[in-house]
Amino acid sequence: MKKKMKLSAVYLAIIFLILYAPIFYLMFYSFNSGGTMYRFEGFTLNWYRELFDDTRLLIIVLNTVIIALLSAAISTILGVAGALAIYYARRQRVKNTLLSLNNVLIVSPDVIIGASFLILFTIIGIKLGFVSVLFAHIAFSVPIVVIMVLPKIEEMSTSMIYAALDLGASRWDVLTKVILPYITPGIFAGFFMALTYSLDDFAVTFFVTGNGFTTLSVEIYSLARRGVSLNINALSTLLFIFTMILVIGYYFITKRNNRPAGLGVKK
């Protein structure tokens, strides 16, 4: 038994090494004064200074954050509504159909989704830019929120709802004071997942961006095509740190929400 546990631990260590070694390699060379990723010549912060002196890149960062926050907030609202609609569907066949359609959007290739949105926006006359990117990010984030919220709704006891109705609560009160507080961990999980998906997305965004507007993922791709620059390393390092902060924040939020009600109360 112990031998199997050691083998599994070694296996996990190798997997994590394969996944994280390139990231730490990239972060390490973001401090290289030599300007290349072949030999480390000395420690410097010049690449970070150049990064923050690049006004155009800072505007792109701001665009990316705004798109991510807006799409995550809107998709969370729509996703919660969608999860409730699926859960309260009267017929099981309708419920299964809606859930299947939701799951199809998650597993569909990003290239197909991006090309479909490009065709759609071209046909209906939406100019490619901020609006088209926002709509696309909302569309692929909503199914993710539904998947995160629906299990929390399904594990909620219906007796809580019936008890609230018997005590005279309106349906709005049941929704806002019973259902939503109970599924709050799922809502936070859906929001953070939608936020990270929006920040990381490249394939869909690449199709729906227009002249004069772009996001970080597309900009990093275009910079990398011009040649290796340690500005990319510095930018990627900051993005990785920001993502880790989001993950840690989500961990503490869920830990706090899952804490027993009586914990920490002084008698």
Image: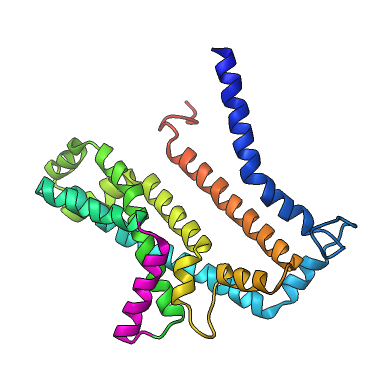
Main SS, magenta residues: helix
| Vertical comparison of 222 with 181: above or below | below
| Residue 180 pos. (x, y %) | 30, 50
- The image's colouring method is rainbow
Which one is nearer the viewer's eye here, 62 or 215? 215
Left or right: 246 with respect to 85? right
Q: Kindly give the residue lying farthest to the left in the view shown.
A: 91
Residue at horizontal 51 percent and vertical 66 percent from the top:
202
Report whether 50 appears left or right of 11: right
Relative vertical location of residue 76 with respect to residue 124 in this rendering, above or below: above
Quadrant in which residue 259 is drawn: top left
Q: Is residue 138 visible?
A: no
- Seen from this angle, which residue lies furthest right? 41
The quadrant in which residue 30 appears is: bottom right
Give the left or right position of residue 91, taking residue 62 as reference: left
Q: Which residues are magenta?
A: 108-126
Q: Please tell me whether residue 110 belongs to the stretch shown in magenta.
A: yes
Position in image of residue 231 (x %, y %): 73, 68
Give the camera-side residue of 118 and 57. Answer: 118
Q: Nearer the viewer, residue 242 or 17?
A: 17
Tell me residue 253's x, y (percent).
49, 45
**Residue 260, placed above or below residue 36:** above
Find out whether residue 253 is within the magenta segment.
no
What residue lies at 61% left-to-right and 20% top-to-bottom?
Answer: 6
How many numbered circles does the render carry?
A: 0
Which residue sits at x=20%, y=48%? Answer: 87
Up the image or down, 203 lies above or below 10; here it is: below
Q: Residue at x 34, y 60 (%)?
A: 142
Give how far across and how far down residue 200 sits, in percent.
52, 61
For residue 241, side relative to residue 75 (left or right) = right
Can residue 187 be seen in this snapshot? yes
